[in-house]
Image (tube, rainbow, N blue to C red):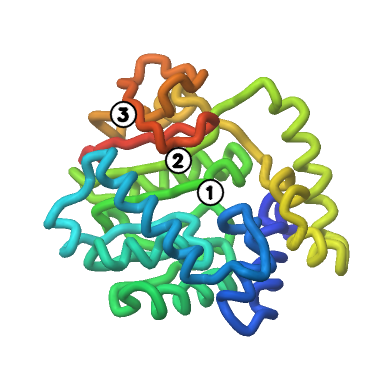
């Protein structure tokens, strides 16, 4: 089966990361994958520190920090090389880091070993970009940040339903998505053209280290709160849609909440899974 184009950049990037001898080199050379920065002075420690800042900020804003976290299992969909994973392993009893590419997961384990609690870490390859190979009701929380926008619409929706499936009744899904915008008629076709370039020998490796080109290649899909809630409303309760204050995102019938740490183009679904 021919590999779907939206998966190509991540597979190529994973292969590129495997060619570096350290996490520092990965961050310096392919920072576009992780924190939108490159440079000879960057370090893996600084990269992880950005996740150390964001993890508690989001958990506290969403009301998800508590003593019980230390005994719970959480799933991170789209862990990459572990920017946020390290912090999660200090917060939760078990962390399952899931990603499309096994190369990222190997680097994730190295990152957590250096900056987190690797004894609490498990990894999960999402080889098809849409399915989670773990059982129903397996985790207490499913979390995803800046991942679902890189999936085609059908895959993103499938991952959302998969996230709900694997969370125990009473547990929580915390999912970040990108809303539709007026620029999409330009950005999405340009992204498709750039992703096609990743199929070409050597060109893909070069593209994987060009930050702005690859940022455009990320542009795959957009989902509105109404799109998502209509599909999953029977399986969740207490659904909240979180946005940045002043963001031009239509909430529909959802309960709206605000946090100034959210990207103006992004929104979060925070909801309880029902039995």
**Mark 1 or mark 2, which has the lower sequence index?**
1
**The residue positioned farthest toward the left in the image shown:** 67
Q: Upstream in the sequence, badge 3 or badge 1?
A: 1
Instruction: Return the x and y of residue 252 as percentages of the image width and height.
Output: 42, 15
Residue 1 location in percent, x, y? 73, 60
Q: CA distance from mark 1 to mark 2?
A: 8 Å
Q: Is residue 59 left or right of residue 1?
A: left
Q: Is residue 139 visible?
A: yes
Q: Which residue is mark 3?
A: 240
Please tell me whether mark 1 sits on a helix, a strand or a loop.
loop
Residue plotted at (28% across, 46% down): 59
Horizontal side of residue 203 vs 259, given as left or right? right
**Relative image position of residue 154 (x, y in whole percent):** 58, 39
Residue position marked by numbered label 2 in the rendering:
176
Q: Which mark is residue 147?
A: 1
| Crowding near the residue tagged with mark 3, few <14, some 14–19, many ≥20 C-alpha atoms within 10 Å | many
């Amino acid at each position: 089966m021919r590999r779907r184009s939206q998966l190509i950049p991540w597979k190529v990037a994973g292969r590129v990361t495997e060619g570096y001898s350290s996490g520092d080199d990965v961050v310096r050379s392919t920072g576009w994958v992780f924190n939108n920065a490159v440079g000879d002075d960057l370090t893996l420690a600084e990269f992880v520190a950005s996740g150390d800042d964001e993890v508690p900020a989001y958990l506290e804003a969403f009301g998800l920090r508590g003593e019980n976290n230390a005994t719970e299992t959480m799933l991170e969909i789209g862990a990459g090389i572990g920017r946020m994973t390290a912090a999660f392993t200090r917060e939760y009893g078990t962390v399952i880091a899931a990603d499309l590419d096994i190369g990222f997961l190997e680097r994730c384990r190295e990152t957590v070993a250096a900056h987190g609690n690797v004894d609490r870490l498990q990894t999960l390859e999402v080889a098809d970009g849409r399915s989670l190979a773990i059982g129903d009701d397996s985790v207490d929380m499913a979390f995803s940040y800046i991942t679902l926008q890189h999936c085609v619409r059908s895959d993103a929706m499938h991952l959302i339903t998969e996230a709900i499936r694997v969370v125990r009744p009473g547990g929580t899904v915390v999912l970040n998505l990108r809303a539709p915008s007026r620029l999409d008629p330009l950005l999405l076709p340009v992204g498709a053209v750039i992703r096609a370039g990743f199929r070409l020998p050597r060109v893909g490796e070069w593209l994987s280290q060009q930050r702005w080109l690859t940022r455009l290649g990320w542009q795959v899909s957009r989902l509105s709160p109404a799109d998502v809630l209509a599909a999953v409303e029977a399986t969740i309760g207490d659904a909240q849609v979180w946005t940045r204050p002043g963001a031009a995102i239509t909430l529909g019938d959802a309960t709206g909440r605000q946090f100034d740490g959210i990207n103006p183009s992004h929104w979060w679904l925070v909801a309880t899974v029902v039995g």
